[in-house]
């Protein structure tokens, strides 16, 4: 059923491409078969069955070209863990959700937390945009971690924590892990990160997830692709997250299923078949 839905999605997104592929493949097959009959008069391609076969083959080829799966599984060798990659809504997934934040664990929407970031969406959806209860849980968790006071920061909180610091927040029986991924400019509130910071940050997130999972699924978005973007292409960023998850799993199991949830706006950037083939070859 999911494959059929993915096919329909592909045809709806590329109707003219689908029609063009049908035409091109039909023309190519027709020309090829006519060439066969030209060189061998005993071979005949004619009739309704012949035409139906050409149409079926042409449509099948076009559908195969525009279809892309919306979900794949990657088994981590010599472990019991599967990494599932799919397009969907992180907040609708079962299990613990991992969300990246800045090193101040800010909560004020606007500056310094953009309402369009996953962090901002989380505060709006889970706390109605009012961060008081969010801050109460986060501050209680952060009390056991060392911090640095940054008095030059104009907006939001002033206590800075190490990249990779991870806290747990519970909302309506759902558990969320918030981990520090990005550094924030103290004046403009512009967040930034890089590959090294991301690797360290993910290590901290997986370490806490290993403690808290308790057999539950772990869900993580395409972190590093938003306002604190690393500047990597979507596939490279996804591969970095996969590599981090595999490396941590091979060190010590985190949980049986790790789910990387991609937003639909990344659908055209990726063919998950290529991602699966890449990791099967390693």
Image (cartoon, rainbow, N blue to C red):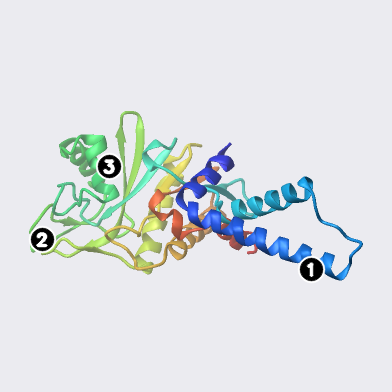
Q: Quadrant of the N terminus?
A: top right
Left or right: 83 in relation to 132: right
- Residue closest to the far top: 172
Q: Label 1 crowding class (10 Å Cα cut-off): few <14, some 14-19, many 20+?
A: few
Q: Nearer the viewer, mark 1 or mark 2?
A: 1
Name the residue beneath numbered marker 2.
153
Q: Which label is found at residue 122?
A: 3
The CA distance from mark 1 to mark 3 is 62 Å
Front residue (pair 117, 35) = 35
Q: Earlier in the sequence, mark 1 or mark 2?
A: 1
For residue 160, the mark is none
Q: Secondary structure at mark 3?
A: helix
- The residues bearing labels 2 and 3 have C-alpha atoms spaced at a distance of 23 Å
Q: Position of residue 166 (x, y in %)?
A: 32, 50
Instruction: Look at the numbered disc 2 and give the secondary structure of its residue.
Output: loop
Of labels 1 and 3, the one closer to you:
1
């Amino acid at each position: 059923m999911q494959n059929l839905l993915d096919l329909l999605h592909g045809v709806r997104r590329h109707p003219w491409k689908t029609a063009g592929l049908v035409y091109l493949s039909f023309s190519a097959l027709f020309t090829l078969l006519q060439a066969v009959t030209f060189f061998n008069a005993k071979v005949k391609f004619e009739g309704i069955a012949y035409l139906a076969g050409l149409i079926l083959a042409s449509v099948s080829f076009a559908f195969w070209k525009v279809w892309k799966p919306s979900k794949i599984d990657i088994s981590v060798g010599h472990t019991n863990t599967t990494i599932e990659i799919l397009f969907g809504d992180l907040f609708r997934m079962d299990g613990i959700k991992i969300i990246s934040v800045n090193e101040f664990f800010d909560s004020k929407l606007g500056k310094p937390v953009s309402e369009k970031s996953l962090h901002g969406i989380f505060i709006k959806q889970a706390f109605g945009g009012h961060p008081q209860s969010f801050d109460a849980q986060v501050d209680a968790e952060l009390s056991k971690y060392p911090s640095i006071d940054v008095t030059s920061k104009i907006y939001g909180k002033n206590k800075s924590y190490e990249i990779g610091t991870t806290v747990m927040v519970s909302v309506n029986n759902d558990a969320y892990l918030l981990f520090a991924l990005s550094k924030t400019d103290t004046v403009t509130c512009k967040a930034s990160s890089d590959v090294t910071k991301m690797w360290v940050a993910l290590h901290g997130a997986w370490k806490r997830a290993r403690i808290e999972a308790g057999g539950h699924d772990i869900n993580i978005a395409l972190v590093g692709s938003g306002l604190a973007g690393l500047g990597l292409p979507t596939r490279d960023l996804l591969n970095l997250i996969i590599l981090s998850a595999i490396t941590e799993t091979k060190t010590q199991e985190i949980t049986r299923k790790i789910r990387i949830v991609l937003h639909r706006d990344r659908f055209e950037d990726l063919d998950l078949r290529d991602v699966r083939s890449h990791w099967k070859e390693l």
